[in-house]
Amino acid sequence: MFATLAAAMLVTLAPQRQSDTTIAVPAGASLSVNNFGGGITVHGWSENRVKVHGETGRRGRVEVSLVGNTVVVKTGSREGAPSVIDLDITVPQSMELNLSGTYADITVDGVQGSISAETVNGEVNVRGGKGNITLHSIQGAVTLADASGRIEVNSVNEDVELTNVSGEIKVETTNGSVMLMGVQSASVDAGTINGDVVYEGTVKDGGSYSFGSHNGDITVSIPEGANVTVTTATANGDIDASFALPLTNTTGKHRKTFKIGSGSARMELESFQGDIEMRRPQELRDRIDRKHKHDENENDNDHDNDYDFDFHFDSSQIAGEVNSAVHYAADYAAKYAKEYAPKYARQYARTYSRNYAKTYRRTH
Amino acid sequence: MNDQWTNRLSEYLDGELDSTERASLEAHLATCGHCYATLGELRQVVARAKALADSEPETNLWPEIKAQISRDSTSRRPSRRVSFTVPQLLAASIALVLLSGGSAWLALQQRPTNTPELVAVTPPPNTRVASWTGSTDVAIAELQAALAQNEKRLDSTTVRIVRKNLAIIDRAIAEARIALRNDPGNAYLNLHLADTMRRKVDLLRRVNDMAAARS
């Protein structure tokens, strides 16, 4: 049956704006998706079928085919510039995924196979995955949660965050922070140029841990009873710990070595400009929780400001001419911007003043 | 600083020490920062070597290799282990990165004949640690030249982001160089500079590959 399907299963969904295609797949099948712009969302389910839901513009098209053991999903445009297409794909939970895009956000949830996801301008958010997990973005944050295996995650211009992951872990970004939480691993290598690195996870005997930054702080948790030789190096920062650190060696001006317990595991903590901190796990978790709450509050306040930010123009104060309305609105907006929300208001002031001017033109 | 264990580190890493020697070396590592640091550097070289993608050579090298083997067989000497100094390790590390970056560059150029040679020069053992950066700078310049030619295949947003991040890396490299000027023998600063330059090579390679894929 699958051979028949493989022979020539090519479904062109265009020109419908929304369409669904479902095909049965053999055990061990993989999924390959390439979408230039839009979104790729993949969910896992318990059935041996792949369901592809596409939302395309008038010119967009989605092709679904079964080539050998691989379900291939391609998007394109009938003419002109590439279309923005959103794909929502449901796959067997154990399916191997190879997802790529250019202006595409990639989201995966509930899949327990190997995952490769790469985009240029977009976020990559993955929950689940086992085996080889490789996630890349140039301009977009990358997050991974509840995964295990050989994990390689990197961004260039955004943050990277891993939560509840295990296995061999390599993480890198250039202009962003690296946050690793709930990690169970004997091999972790994480670095950035311009951002902080936080590690909260296991320190296993014989393990190898390396964390580095040029401009950011390095903060790691070291559980009580851990056996680790910690080598720290910083050119311009400080070293601090919540517990006693037995110094065993100093190499040059910048490098210090501490032996904790038997020193069985190796941990390198290096930051050129930043500080190096070693904390107990609970202490670090509490700090992360506080930061998350603070960030959430800040976001809430931002929204409040967004919605509260309003102009109560008294039309009697405005001259009847459009030009003066524009002038007045801009001045008024600038006043609010300066007085109430220096961080965000200028951006909104311009928008509101333009909207006000348009409204005023229509009504006068 | 060298001690009796420094030259045994590569054997240790290869798992070629017997259990007694291994235990002795591990005990030594716990107290000798120099050997521990050197071992870390050696591990990085090995890790980078493993991370390199296999690629076909541009030309068939076997005839030359065969001829060399034939010449060597007439004056064969007992094999011996080669131990590395820190400068050699750094040079080897950078060379591995550069050779990998060079292959991407050559692929991008798609000029099977008359391809420019990218040579990673290994300094002699007594060369000061920071001197390896010359060949790295050349390779980076070549990759940047390739990117300048090919970035028109990329959208303006991507180009802007890439340039911004290259500038961030450049600032980090400049700061590391300044620190090294004041402390040229510092192993951490050398490794930090090497790693930061490796990051730049990686980013340039990645973007060049991306541009090539869109051609």
Image: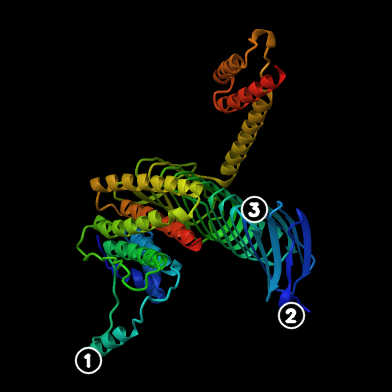
Which quarter of the rendered picture does the N terminus of chain A lie within? bottom right
Q: Position of residue A265 (x, y in %)?
A: 47, 59
Residue A88 quadrant: bottom right
The amino acid marked with disc number 3 is: Ser
Mark 3 secondary-structure assignment: loop
Relative to the observer, which residue lies in front, B94 or A168?
Answer: B94
Q: Chain of mark 2?
A: A
Q: Which one is closest to the eye, mark 2 or mark 3?
A: 3
Residue at mark 1 to residue at mark 3: CA–CA distance: 67 Å
- Which residue is identified by label 2? A3
Residue at 59% over, 14% down: A324
Q: CA distance from mark 2 to mark 1?
A: 59 Å
In the rendered image, which residue does mark 1 sit on?
A: B74
Using the image, tell me which numbered label, if any, was put on residue A83.
3
Label 1, secondary structure: give it.
loop
* Res A120 visible: yes
Q: CA distance from mark 2 to mark 3?
A: 32 Å
First of labels 2, 3 by sequence position: 2
Q: Three-letter amino acid code at disc 1?
A: Thr
Q: Do the residues marked 2 and 3 share a common chain?
A: yes
Q: Amino acid at mark 2?
A: Ala
Can you tell which quarter of the image residue B34 is in? bottom left
Q: Are marks 2 and 1 on the same chain?
A: no
The relative height of residue A140 versus residue A98 in the rendered view (above or below) is above
- Residue B33 visible in the picture: no
The chain letter for the residue carrying disc 3 is A
Say whether residue B213 is left or right of residue A44. left
Residue B197 at what x, y percent from top left?
36, 54
Image quadrant in which you'd find residue B44: bottom left
Q: Measured along the vertical axis of the image, is residue A300 above or below residue B34?
A: above
Callout 1–callout 3 Cβ contact below 8 Å: no
Q: Give percent across and percent down for residue A194.
A: 44, 44
